[in-house]
Image (tube, rainbow, N blue to C red):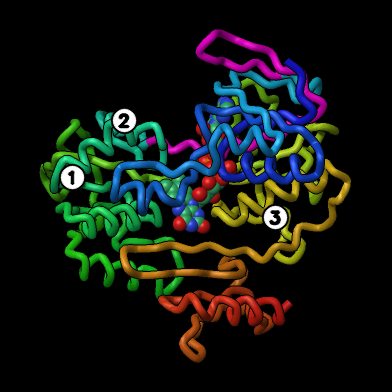
Amino acid sequence: MRAEVAIVGNGVAGTACAMRLAREGIRPLLIGPGLPVDRPPLTKSALADGVPRLLSDAARLAERGIDLLDGMVASVDLAACMLTVATEEGETSVAAERVVLTTGLAYRPPPIPGLDGAFVNANPHVFDALGRLLTSGPVEIIVVGAGLIGTESAATLAQAGHSVTLVDLLDRPLDRLHAPLPDLGRETLDELGVQFHGGVAIESATEYSLETAAHGTLEADVILAATGGVPFAPPGLAIDPEHLPLAVAADMLVPGYERAYACGDLVLVPHARFGAMRFPHWDAAIGTGEHVADSIAGNGGPYERLPYWWSDIGPRRLAEVGFAEAASTWAEEDGLHVGRNTSGEPVCVLVVDAPRRLREARAIVQDGA
Ligand SMILES: Cc1cc2nc3c(=O)[nH]c(=O)nc-3n(C[C@H](O)[C@H](O)[C@H](O)COP(=O)(O)OP(=O)(O)OC[C@H]3O[C@@H](n4cnc5c(N)ncnc54)[C@H](O)[C@@H]3O)c2cc1C
């Protein structure tokens, strides 16, 4: 099989890249398992009703001039732009003029005995079984990991009427994020009736229980692992896993290759203002995916899209523009949480439960540039 551009990974960045390429008159081949599934609903609407949301379907993609190959890329030769893809019918080879890597993060539980049997709702394929369990009536659930994915999941499940316990090794939900996010997370979980236990070291797990060091045995009908993801590249790349996420150039080319690009959660975003940044969020996946397409079409330039992420924790609406890691101080200013760098410039603004103020937040960070 031949392709103008072979896109390895059919998630948020890969689909955004394919759509923009098609608009530029370039025919992409989007490779990945099944149809492209959106990720944010997996902790929100899909967890409430058991049904993942598609980014597009086969008919609409075909209409736009996007070819699909349902399978997993088993190996890649980036210099030759040759791929081997494992499909249900067997292995097939793809010779492309250009390759785009966009395989995102791999969400696997940590190597604790038995925990690999837990449901991981960041992976859409688990929803066949998980959806059936969650829609059969209220159940008792333990969510392991209180980062954004775990905290959102716990809140959604509690809102849907389940009895939810959230555990983490760290003392607070959203503990790695800046103030006031951990306190806001805890407050919202309390309001929704989620039991939070911090400082929980899990020693082993079964399908229905966790054995912990200081909290004894915790039991539930469903165990959900939300323990985070690590950048994942397909096999066969001459890239040391230590070098992930990939530090791509401003034109999104993989260093050392002339026809291989990467985008989405797999890359350090080459931001014109903030430098190379790790920013595994939905809007950056779309932005970097489209930026690859622009570079391939000859319309490249610096990547300047203002970083942005949002999170819905039950009824709570969080949205942040800018780059929190660039901030050295945080203060509440007229109801917005503003992060400033060492020169006093606003580099990040967190908006809590005020979606209409997002435009204002953007202007604050933009004017600080
Ligand atoms: C559960 C969840 C909730 C989220 N909620 C939010 C949110 O509320 N707000 C926000 O800003 N961000 C959110 N994010 C982050 C956002 O969705 C990601 O940043 C975005 O999906 C990254 O896009 P990507 O294309 O790089 O990776 P993904 O969207 O994960 O796509 C990667 C794709 O590559 C495919 N793939 C992997 N290996 C291969 C292979 N060998 N061959 C072919 N295909 C392969 C996978 O099947 C997958 O389809 C959430 C993420 C998750 C997981």
Asked if residue 288 is positioned above or below residue 100 in the image, the reply reads below
Measure the C-alpha gap from mark 2 to mark 1.
19 Å
Q: Residue furthest bottom?
A: 334
Secondary structure found at label 2 = helix
Q: Which residues are magenta?
A: 83-108
Which quarter of the rendered picture does the N terminus lie within? Answer: top right
Q: Secondary structure at mark 1?
A: loop
Q: Position of residue 200 (x, y in %)?
A: 23, 51
Q: Is residue 137 at least partly visible in the picture?
A: yes
The alpha-carbon separation of the residues under discs 3 and 2 comes to 33 Å
Residue 85 occupies quadrant: top right
The image shows a total of numbered marks equal to: 3
Question: Who comes first in sequence, dot 3 or dot 2?
Answer: 2
Per the image, is 89 magenta?
Answer: yes
Mark 2 or mark 1, whichever is nearer to me? 2
Q: Is residue 289 left or right of residue 165?
A: right
In the depicted structure, whether residue 16 falls above or below residue 26: below
Check contact, mark 2 vs mark 1: CB within 8 A: no
Q: Position of residue 104 (x, y in %)?
A: 56, 40
Q: Residue at x 68, y 33 (%)?
A: 66
Upstream in the sequence, badge 2 or badge 1? 2
Which amino acid, by three-letter code, is at mark 1?
A: Ala
Say which residue label 1 marks.
213
Q: Which residue is mark 3?
A: 276
Q: Which mark is residue 116?
A: 2
**Quadrant assignment, res 192:** bottom left
What distance separates the C-alpha of mark 1 from that of mark 3?
Answer: 39 Å
> Mark 3, residues whose alpha carbon is within 10 Å: few (<14), some, or many (≥20)?
some
